Amino acid sequence: MDGEENQVSPQLKPHDLTKTVLSILFLLALMAASFWIMLPFLSALLWATMVVISTWPVMLGLQARLWGRRGLAATVMTLALLMVLIIPLGVAVGALVSHMDEIVGWAKAPEKLVLPQPPGWVEGLPVVGPKAANAWKVMTEAGPDGLAGKLKPYAGRILEWFAGKVGGLGGMVLQFLLIVIISAILYVNGETAAAGVRRFTHRLAGDRGDRAAVLAAGAIRGVAMGVVVTAVSQSVVAGIGLMLAAVPGMALLTSAILVLCLAQLGPMLIMIPAVVWKYQTGDAFGGTLLVVFALVSGTMDNFLRPVLIRKGADLPLLLIIAGVIGGMISMGIMGIFIGPVVLAVTHTLLNEWIHLDPSAE
């Protein structure tokens, strides 16, 4: 009997329970403090990770051409990233500063704006035509003072929003510099960082965790190839069309098309009004030319995006698109990458669990 009692595992003593609880609380507090300290750098770290994972094959190819020297290849990639991020931002800031007087003048423009009589086609629009034409006539008859009263509150709000964004450009420049610096570090120590992530995920979920880490990297690369490259290609084609058709504000419209393409809305929200405006001004040749470029830019994603995504990750296209749109809505631009990664990892782990042989557990 005494031997059996000695074989019974001892119960947890009160002081052992206290020690365990305090250890867990200390670890949680340490994790919370670490997260709080790293919070200002979290966005830059996520962006740098996405950039490095997406461009890692390019860096390896560049390293092979530079006599296998990682430091030289990382330097070239960092300088290229610096030019891609900083130079356009510097040009944009310079353009804003140099045209600040004009921007302020646009906010005061409603006071001098005279609205002409509505064209005949406005009243012919289905459903909303008569109401729109009547509202247009009311503002025209009211003269500049009436129109200014309608537009001035909106102009003031837009100017206030714009001033706030311009005031935050310094923080944006600092954020871009952090992205470049962290990307340079990851380019140099990419294998070490990847090995650490894979060891951590293997510690959490064994072989499944390791496969999930590899899948997440493939999903990021697939999204970068399929979504970003496609959006840039569509924007370039649409921008060329706007330039050849001599549409005013071509650079601004092209930037808006890029944002719309990243959000999976396509370029037609900009191109169709531009086509209508060209025909309305009597430029039939420019309108027809713009129609051709609008059709090409609006349909090229149907065959370009699936090919590029398949090169980066062997995942269902519907899953990628749902992740991009859902991530964009819930988390902004960063969600374009995070959304598909979360759905891809969840899909893979769930699929493996469903098809797992119970006898193998």
Image: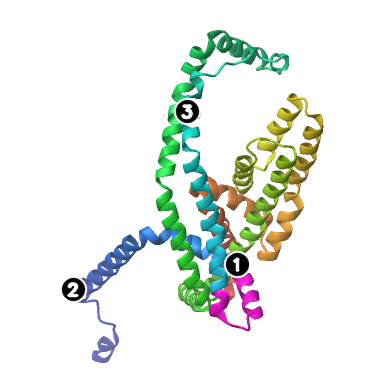
Camera-near label (3 vs 2) is 3
Q: Give the prevailing secondary structure in the magenta stretch.
A: helix
Marked residue nearer the N-terminal end (1 or 2): 2
Q: Is the Cβ of the residue at disc 1 closer than 8 Å to that at disc 2?
A: no
Element under disc 2: helix
Is residue 60 highlighted in magenta?
yes
Q: Amino acid at mark 2?
A: Pro
Q: Amino acid at mark 3?
A: Ala
Residue at 25% x, 81% y: name it.
10
Q: Which residues are magenta?
A: 53-74
In the image, residue 115 sits, relative to residue 345, either above or below, namely above
- The tag on residue 14 is 2
Distance between the alpha carbons at the discs numbered 1 and 3: 42 Å
Residue on which disc 3 sits: 107
User: Where is residue 317, by image quadrant?
Assistant: bottom right
Nearest the eye: 41 or 322: 41
Element under disc 1: helix
Residue on which disc 1 sits: 55
Distance between the alpha carbons at the discs numbered 3 and 2: 72 Å
In the image, residue 151 sits, relative to residue 204, either above or below, namely above
